[in-house]
Image (cartoon, rainbow, N blue to C red):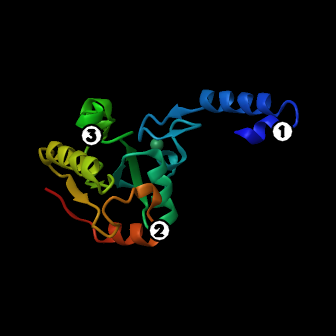
Amino acid sequence: MYWLLRAPEGTAAEIAAALASLSEGVVYCSICCDLGGVDPCPICAHPNRDDSTVLVVEQPQDIAAFERSGEYRGRYHVLHGAISPLDGIGADQLKVRELLERLRDGTVTEVILATDPDVEGDATALYIGRLLAGIGGVKVTRLAHGISVGTEIEYADAMSLARALENRRLFG
Ligand SMILES: [Zn+2]
């Protein structure tokens, strides 16, 4: 931030104003829970995406990673975190209820669990997988281990993500 001290007068104020308007303009998509400027978000509003598939990710940034891979044409759901007892984060703090709500009308036939391949991500996938096992007509899959363990989805390269998606397997 030291560069800011030497920046032309007014720069800091401009940045502060830009940041303030940024957080004001941020809304949750009421369908997928992604954060953006509009509700519904452009992906949920897109007429040509596959409604039968929902890919569940931990963070909004993960959507960008999958979009970069160019392989996925379905919808998304953002949990906003992963189950982590050590950090006091349980399923209640995540957007799990919103996901269940989306499965009620029977349009969705596959839920792809794309939480990070780490302890928290696996625990979260397991939890959601068990919840969804009771819902008839919904296939639950998990990304293949194409991306190395410990790599966050957000930083996975497009090729690996595409491969992990293609080789996803039945879960549970
Ligand atoms: Zn959305």
Q: In which quarter of the view is residue 84 placed?
A: top left
Front label number (2 vs 3): 3
Kind of residue at badge 1? Ala
Disc 2 to disc 3, C-alpha distance: 26 Å
Q: Residues within 10 Å of mark 1 (few under 14, many from 20)?
A: few
Q: Amino acid at mark 3?
A: Ile
Within 8 Å of ligand 1, the CB of disc 1? Answer: no
- The 10 Å Cα crowd at callout 3, few under 14, some 14 to 19, many 20 or more, is many
| Residue 1, image x, y percentages | 70, 39
* Residue in the picture at 28% in, 71% down: 167
Image mark for residue 83: 3
Disc nearer the start of the sequence (1/2): 1
In this rendering, the answer to whether 97 lies above or below 77 is above
User: What residue would you read off at disc 2?
Assistant: 158
Quarter that holds the C terminus:
bottom left
Position of 2 with respect to 9 (left or right) is left
Q: Is residue 93 left or right of residue 4?
A: left
Structural distance between the alpha carbons of marks 3 and 1: 42 Å
Q: Which mark is residue 42?
A: none
Q: Secondary structure at mark 1?
A: loop
Residue drawn 23% across the image and 52% down it: 122
Q: Amino acid at mark 2?
A: Ala
Please name which of the two marks, 3 or 1, marks the residue nearer to the observer: 1
| Residue in view at x 46 percent, y 52 percent | 63
Point out the frontmost of discs 1 and 2.
1
Q: Residues within 10 Å of mark 2 (few under 14, many from 20)?
A: some
Query: Residue 72 or 16: which is nearer the viewer?
Result: 16
Q: Tag 3, which secondary structure?
A: loop
Q: In the drawing, what numbered circle is on residue 7?
A: 1
State the image quarter where residue 37 is shown.
top right
Numbered disc 2: secondary structure: helix
